[in-house]
Image (spheres, rainbow, N blue to C red):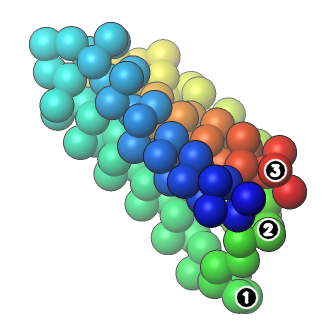
Amino acid sequence: MELIRLSIHYGLHFIFPVIIAYFFFNKNWKAAYFIMLLTMLIDLDHLLATPIFDPNRCSIGFHPLHTYWALAVYIALCFFKRTRVIGMGLVLHLITDGLDCLWL
């Protein structure tokens, strides 16, 4: 069961962005996908936790860049053309992490 959960979690971190990039930014979907992949850098906030990785911990609301306040900022980024791709990548990241929390 754990392998299935991890496969879905990490699979969605790569599948959600490519689908969104292709449908919303079809002319520049590769660049949009790359930027969305870079938004996974928000996981660096896991370095502030002890232990750094806990497969049974819900990231949402625990790590500083995975809070509801941060989500509000990420959603706001979606409304501006210059930051839309970044905002969408961050929102998709938190959705994926939120889905993972449902398994716990």
Circle 2 sits on which residue?
Answer: 57
Residue 49 as seen in the image, left or right of residue 22:
right
In three-dimensional space, the C-alpha distance between marks 2 and 3, rounded to whole angstroms, equals 10 Å
Quadrant of the rendered image containing residue 41: bottom left
Going 73% across and 88% down the picture, which residue do you hit? 50
Question: Where does the image place residue 5, in percent across and percent down from the top left?
Answer: 67, 54
| Sequence-earlier tag: 2 or 1 | 1
Q: Nearer the viewer, mark 2 or mark 3?
A: 3
Q: In the image, which disc is placed on residue 103?
A: 3
* Disc 3 to disc 1, C-alpha distance: 21 Å
* Marking on residue 50: 1
User: How many other residues sit within 10 Å of disc 1, few (<14), some (14-19) or many (≥20)?
Assistant: few
Of mark 2 and mark 3, the one earlier in the sequence is: 2
In the figure, residue 2 lies in which quadrant? bottom right
> Sequence-wise, which precedes: disc 3 or disc 1?
1
Q: Is residue 44 above or below residue 94?
A: below
Any part of residue 100 in sight: yes
Q: Is residue 39 above or below residue 49?
A: above
Q: Does 38 sit left or right of 54 as displayed?
A: left
Disc 3 is placed on an element classified as: loop
Where 7 falls versus 52 (above or below)? Answer: above
Give coordinates of residue 25: x percent, y percent: 26, 15
Is the residue under label 1 in contact with that under label 2 (CB below 8 Å)?
no
